[in-house]
Amino acid sequence: MRRILVTGALGQIGSELVPALRARHGAEQVIASDIRVPPAGAGTDGPFAVLDVTNFRQLQDLVRRHEIGTLYHLAALLSATAEERPHVAWEINMGGLYKILEVARENRCALFHPSSIAAFGPGTPRAATPQDTVQRPNTMYGVTKVAGELLADYYAHRFGLDVRGLRFPGLISHTALPGGGTTDYAVAIFYDALRHGRYRCFLGPDTRLDMMYMPDAVRATLELMEADPARLEHRNAFNIAAANFTPAELAAEIRKHLPGFEIEYEVDPQRQAIADSWPQSLDDTAARTEWGWRPRYDLAAMTAEMLEQLRPKLKLA
Ligand code: SER
């Protein structure tokens, strides 16, 4: 079997996807890569390479040297950072994806590329957003996501590339922190709840968004990549959904475990505007029928497990 390369491996998704891939295929079969060097003590459980995804030659060398057959391309800036640095976001998110697609085409690699709820915009139906609908995002992150979906479709149809992807909602995990996203509050709230018993939220109390616990996101990724291609109509941009809540509802759920927990709101207008441009919930029927997607973690299950996992990590057990 040709090997697997994961870009952005030290990020929020990569930190859990790499161990899951290594458990399935063997540690030596999975090359983790990132533009950052792993912190001391991390990244020692298998091969690691420093990689700038905007450097075509470096990418091509790595893919050929390690005989890569499948790419999981996770390197990207998230929504709030992309809005602050739109030129850099275009360079990394679009430039990186284009080079990954070219390397995948030249080396006949399969490719996983995540899209997002951010691929939709203010003109999209906001509740139970259909799989195929209006996509006119008004953020740079969203523009790169919808353009990425189209480019991936083009490579699939024009060059027969096996490229697949998911429109992830906000992802919640206890392993690695997200950075620069609009949905980051749903992770930070757990750390502050356990450490300080209170959290100051940068989105308003009624901001409803789809969210997903990382074990569901990792399983969705693996299941999609293993799905029978003959059954896939949408291939690289499946809506998927699991949990759905507002900051006020998440705070109420945390309070069931930590009764004294308090939340206050100091709305950041830029991130609020981004959240308000996104759907409140996605219809994931296509993922359910085309490859059997079923979430396992709702708000209650995710909250209980996040608190249980973070307590020892924060030495609060
Ligand atoms: N979680 C991401 C963000 O907030 C959305 O894809 O940017």
Image: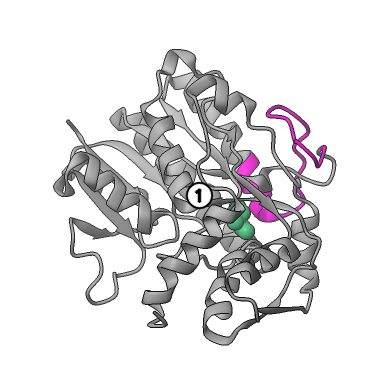
Q: Amino acid at mark 1?
A: Gly
**In the depicted view, which residue is nearer to us: 262 or 275?**
262
User: Can I make out residue 260 in this image?
Assistant: yes
Looking at the image, which residue is at 77% across and 45% down?
121
Give the quarter of the image for residue 184. Answer: bottom right
Instruction: State left or right for residue 108 relative to residue 90.
Output: left
Kind of element beneath mark 1: helix
Please provide the residue range marked out in magenta: 125-146
Q: Quadrant of ligand 1?
A: bottom right
Instruction: State left or right for residue 129 relative to residue 117.
Output: right
Looking at the image, which residue is at 25% across and 69% down?
42
Reading the image, the residue beneath label 1 is: 95
Looking at the image, which residue is at 53% across and 20% down?
290
How far across and down, in percent of the image, does residue 138 sit? 77, 51
How far across and down, in percent of the image, does residue 127 sit? 80, 40
How far across and down, in percent of the image, does residue 202 sit? 72, 73
- State how many labels appear: 1
Q: Quadrant of the C terminus?
A: bottom left
